[in-house]
Image: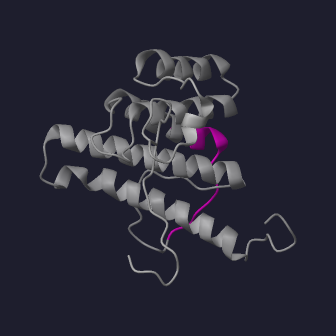
Amino acid sequence: YYDANLNPTSWTVNSLWGQYYRITERANSIIDNAETVEMTDEQRAQIIAEAKCFRARAYFTLYRLWENIYVTDEPSRSLDIEIFPSEKEAIFDLIRNDLDDAISTLDWIPAAKGRYTQAVARHLRADLALWEEDYEEAELQAKAIIEQGPHALLDNVRDVFEPDDLDHAEALYVMHFNLVEPGSER
């Protein structure tokens, strides 16, 4: 709610701030530790690219909500650190580089439902470009989604919201979940 209760101590603000910084911290840890986990180079590249999408999206959301944020690509090793707000250019550089890396790595078709794809990374990159007023880059990314990927507009706009088929050609990123009523069995 956008009312007098929306202040730094409200649970809504605190929850969003904490949630997105937890995402960035986990993404930083995944990226930093990916080399220590036994997996194929292809799996490692996929995981790092997805973590970069998560980190870019989280930092971009934090920036859009508060602007005055701290960004880092290093996992926290201690709680005893001094944190100062990052410059806007440093924030956008990290987000841009993460998304460009993800675009060059991710496939158009997800390995499994709910995974980040090149289309999602390009969509985020276009959104960032709009914030930077780089309309040529925004157009480039949007056209790539439309012309290079498997996505297309559906003939009937009602089909976009058809609950039986959320994985249609227009959907770039679909999260699958079931609503569980309080007190009901899972």
**Is 45 in front, or is 83?**
45
Q: State the image coordinates of residue 9 (x, y, percent, origin top left).
A: 73, 77
Residue 67 visible in this rendered orientation of the protein: no
Identify the residue shown where x is 50% and y is 48%: 163
Which quadrant of the rendered structure holds the N terminus? bottom right
The percent coordinates of residue 146 (x first, y second) are 50, 19
Q: Quick check: is 148 in the magenta stretch?
A: no
Q: Is residue 2 left or right of residue 181?
A: right
Image x and y of residue 7, in percent: 78, 71
Left or right: where does residue 34 sit relative to residue 151?
A: left
Comparing 112 with 185, the one in front is 185
Quadrant of res 101? top left
Q: What quarter of the picture does the C terminus occupy?
A: bottom left
The magenta region covers 81-93
Which residue does the image show at 46% across and 43% down from the upper left?
Answer: 166
Taking depth in this image into account, of 87 and 94 the one nearest to the observer is 94
- Depth order, front residue of 97/124: 124
Vertical placement of 157 versus 81: above or below?
A: above
Q: Seen from this angle, which residue lies furthest right? A: 4
Say left or right for 21 vs 87: left
Query: In the image, is 39 to the left or to the right of 15?
Result: left
Q: Residue at x 40, y 23 (%)?
A: 150
In magenta stretch: residue 83: yes
Q: As displayed, is residue 115 above or below residue 126?
A: below
